Each structure stands twice: as C-alpha cells, then as structure tokens.
Amino acid sequence: MWSSGALTDIEKAKDDASKLVVLGSAHRAGIFEALSEERDIGSLKEILNADERALYIILEALYAMGYVNRIGEKYVIADKARPIFLEHGDEYVGGSLPHFMDILGAWLHLPETLKGNKPEKSSGKRDVAAFMNAMAARPGNVVEETVNHCLNRKSDAKKVLDLGGGPGKYARAFVNKGMDVVLYDMPDAIDYVGTHFGLKDITALRLKKGDFTREGFVKELNGESFDIVFMGNICHIYSEDENKKLVRRARELLNNNGMIAIEDFVRGRSPIAEMFAVNMLANTESGNTYTEKQYREWLEVAGFGSIEVKDLDGNENQLITGFPE
C-alpha cells in the first residue's frame, strides 16, 4: 500500500476505490459474517437492522464483484471471499479494513488541511477496536524479524518496555523470547487489548496505562529501568520536537548499557515513507515521517551512540538502534 513509482492509472484507481468502499461498508455492517450461510434479504434485514433498499443494492454490487453468490432469492459469501472476510488467516483483512475506512474519511479533508486547517477530531471516543485490530494485522514475520534484530544487538536483554505497543504483537514476541515486558499505552487501548487480545493473561507481560507524551510519564514507572525501550511505529505520529523529547525520556528509562529501538518508515530508505506522511497529515496534528539524519541527530543529542539503521521487510520499514554513551 502507498508504494511510489509509476504514475497512477486514474480510472483504475477510481474504480478500485469505489469497490473498496463497498467492501469496507459491507464488512463493517456485518454483511459478510451474516452471509456465512445462505440468507434472503428479509432475514438479513432483521439480523442487521438494515434498510431493505440499501441491502439489495449493496448485495447486488457484491454479487457483481464476485464476493457474494446469489442462489435464487438468497445470498451467501463466495468461497474465495471467506479467507478475506471470515477466516483469520494470512488473507484476512477484516482487522485492517475498518481502520482504513476511517483513514479514507480523513483524507477527503486534505484540501482544507492544505490551507492550514488541522484534522478534525471526532467529538466521540476514538474507534479503539478498529485501530487496535488494524495494528494487530501486522504480519507476524515482520514482527519476528524486528524482535530478532533487537535481541541480536542486545543479546543480554531481560527486560523490555514497549511504548505505545497497542495490540501487543511485539510485546508477545519479546515474551516468547524469554523477556519480561511492560506494555505502556493509553488507558482505552490497554483496556481493549487486555481483554480482546488476552494480554492480561500473559504472566511475563505487565500492562501499564498512561500517556508517554506527558513530561511526567517517566516517574509513573516508579524508578524502573529497562534493557530495551522499544518504540514501534509511533514516531510518525508526532512532530520532530515531540520525538526529541520522547527519545530523551526513553534514555532516562534505560539501564546503563540499555538500548533504544525505534521501528518506523524512514524517508530516503522506505519506499512508502512519503505517502505515509500524507496519512499523518490527514490524521494527526503534527505527524510526519523522518530521515535517517534526523533520527541520528535526535539520538545523538539525547546521549546515544553506536547508532545503527537496519532495513526490515525488504526495505519497507527500518529499525534504528542505539546505546547510551
């Protein structure tokens, strides 16, 4: 997604975008789950509490696209669509698609954002479930690669702080390598992942609620220090000044020979960094993607040396590591 290179085929992109909105809307409304067995529009209307006209139009569109089969007056999800929307395997997009729909809504406000207007904040609570499930859709092999690189550089690590680790994919991977891990994130995120992802039941994993952008967050950890402070895909949410502060706070939480580890999309190395920055423009007040030079400067100013930047997942993501000098 968001790869750069050849010019976009505008007509094909418009067609794909339209189809994606239909699929995302159908999934979010529960249509695919309801169609795990054959149903007519009348029964679907009752199950989904939906409008009959809207149901008919969307079902026929899904049938035309090949995601739904029509048998007489009944509909059922097509076999090729089951792994995409029902089965939680490698092809499943049900975790990430609702979040992408939210992102798409924000992108439509980019003309106003270009004139200096900040992204609109919803008056209600953020869709924690959509966001956490989207983050949980990160491929397991990428997570494993990241954690292995961390432990190759810091082979004697025993205790890890996962800042903003959300669904806990990295935290779980560190635990599976024998680490004791503290997962620190916002209260609503911790409440959701503790229950829905079973994180509260993992013995070597402690869940800690808080806001690491606050100056006093270091004190909330009650003097604990860590062998690794891991910051996975959070720097792009914040401004350069905010990231400088975050790196400095991470330094305060490390043992003398501890290691900071930052995973993100580095401009000049990741082919999606520039387009991902557009997503941050649309969805955050100050987010961006940053160059290797910027990351190195932040770490050096905070007192880190032996800085290394490693390409991950081909070269889509990068891992920046460093040690206190």
Image: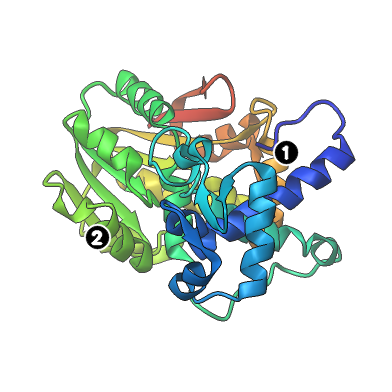
At numbered mark 2, what does the secondary structure look like: helix, strand or loop?
A: helix
Residue type for callout 1: Glu
Q: Residue at x 35, y 50 (%)?
A: 167
Q: Residue at x 40, y 27 (%)?
A: 146
* Element type at mark 1: helix
Q: Nearer the viewer, residue 160 or 188?
A: 188
| Residue 214 sits in quarter | bottom left
Residue 195 tag number: 2
Q: Position of residue 271 (x, y in %)?
A: 68, 28
Residue 244 as seen in the image, left or right of residue 182: right
- In contact (CB < 8 Å): disc 2 and disc 1: no
Work out whether residue 239 can be spotted. Answer: no
Mark 2 to mark 1 CA distance (whole Å): 35 Å
In terms of depth relative to the viewer, which is nearer, 77 or 189?
A: 77
- Horizontal relation, residue 275 to residue 89: left or right: right
Query: What residue appears at the point 84 percent right and 26 percent down from the top-left corner?
Result: 6
- Type of the residue with mark 2: Thr
Relative height, residue 225 to residue 208 (above, below) = above
Quadrant including the N terminus: top right
Q: Report which residue position mark 1 lands on.
A: 274
Q: Give the x, y percent position of residue 51.
A: 60, 76
Name the outermost residue toward the left: 203
Q: Position of residue 114 (x, y in %)?
A: 84, 60
The crowding category of the residue bearing disc 1, from other C-alpha atoms within 10 Å (few below 14, some 14 to 19, many at least 20), is: some
